[in-house]
Image: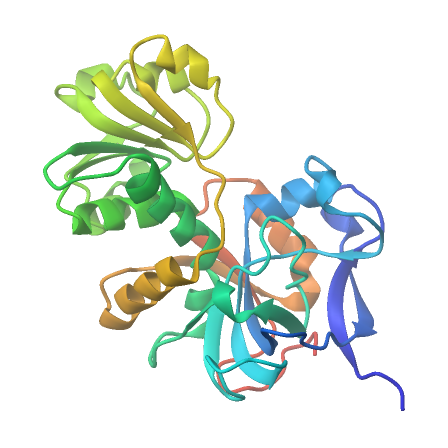
Amino acid sequence: MSQPEMAAVVIDAFGGPEVLRLTRSPRPQPGPGEVQIKVHAVGVNPADWKTRQGHVGALISQFPAVLGWDVAGTVSGAGPGVHAFAVGDRVFGLPAFPQPANTYAEYVTAHVNELAALPDGVTFPVAAGAPLAALTAWQALFEAAKLRGGQRVLVNAAAGGVGHIAVQLARGAGAEVLAIASPRNRSFVEGLGATQVLDYSRELAVQVGGPVDVVIDAHGEAEDELAELLRPGGTFVSIVSPDLERFRARGLIAYIVFVHPEGRQLDRVAELLGRGDLLINIDRTFPLDQAADAHAYAERGHTRGKVVLEVLTEDGNPDSAA
């Protein structure tokens, strides 16, 4: 008997969005502690297109390769020793990161420890937009910065995927949140709970109104200007790759966050989503067979929240890629 196949988006070489192509691939089977997921939606992240470009090419050992990490769907099979989920359960997660998870496909497998149950009422596209960005924001705020209520937090790129979640999590923790965004995103970021929105095109020091305790930099530019806004002994957290020693030489605490899958943290994110206390703003969705267009759109920047690929619609019908 031949192995069942599925639609998947692959690359045969590193390059621009045009190297993404739809093909047929063998359907993966779950191993011990894993479930098979029938994919409904997949989040598009900078890590995806940086991998496609070859900037983190060490993650790919052979071609053709399937991209993607964020995933939301329904459990369609279970390997030995799985008790946490059953066939038909709605789940979402960040499998295997930073190793390949191959989520740009109709089916994926994932370890149960890297998944969370998806609450009723939360759509698959919203769930697919959450894992990498929400876990990055969570780990930046609560693992690295050890955020406490009453602190002043400055979030750079506050309308983006990580930034718009960081604003909400910090506000929910009782922090005073200052957010850097473009004028067109001012009302959007204010609606997320930011106490003050700073215009990135103007000098920040004249807008901020005193030193801040924590900077969350989700963009990677103007790092020195951001560091000047911190109080002595303040904490600078980046999700890119700054020169940490440069900041530490100023008497600052500095971290870079490399997100890691964490099922318990994802459970907390699921709770917030289920209660309506966390918004995952979906800027735009694309069908799976338009992954190249999704990458081109997202890479231009200035998205408000997340870009998502839909593999199945909410009623379970396949889109044009299935």
Please determine whether, in this image, residue 246 is positioned above or below residue 31: above
- Outermost residue toward the left in this view: 150
Quarter of image, res 263? bottom left
Side of 137 where 171 appears, left or right = left
- The N terminus sits in image quarter: bottom right
For the point 47% across and 53% down, which residue is it? 132
Kindly tell me whether residue 176 is visible in this rendering: yes
Q: Quadrant of residue 202?
A: top left
Q: Is residue 227 above or below residue 119?
A: above
At 26% from the left and 40% from the top, the residue drawn is 186
User: 221 left or right of 120?
Assistant: right
Classify 42 as above or below 294: below
Residue visible at 43% across and 50% down? Answer: 133
Location of residue 213 in the rendering, given as x and y in whole percent from the top left corner: 20, 26
Outermost residue toward the right in this view: 1
Q: How is the model colour-coded?
A: rainbow
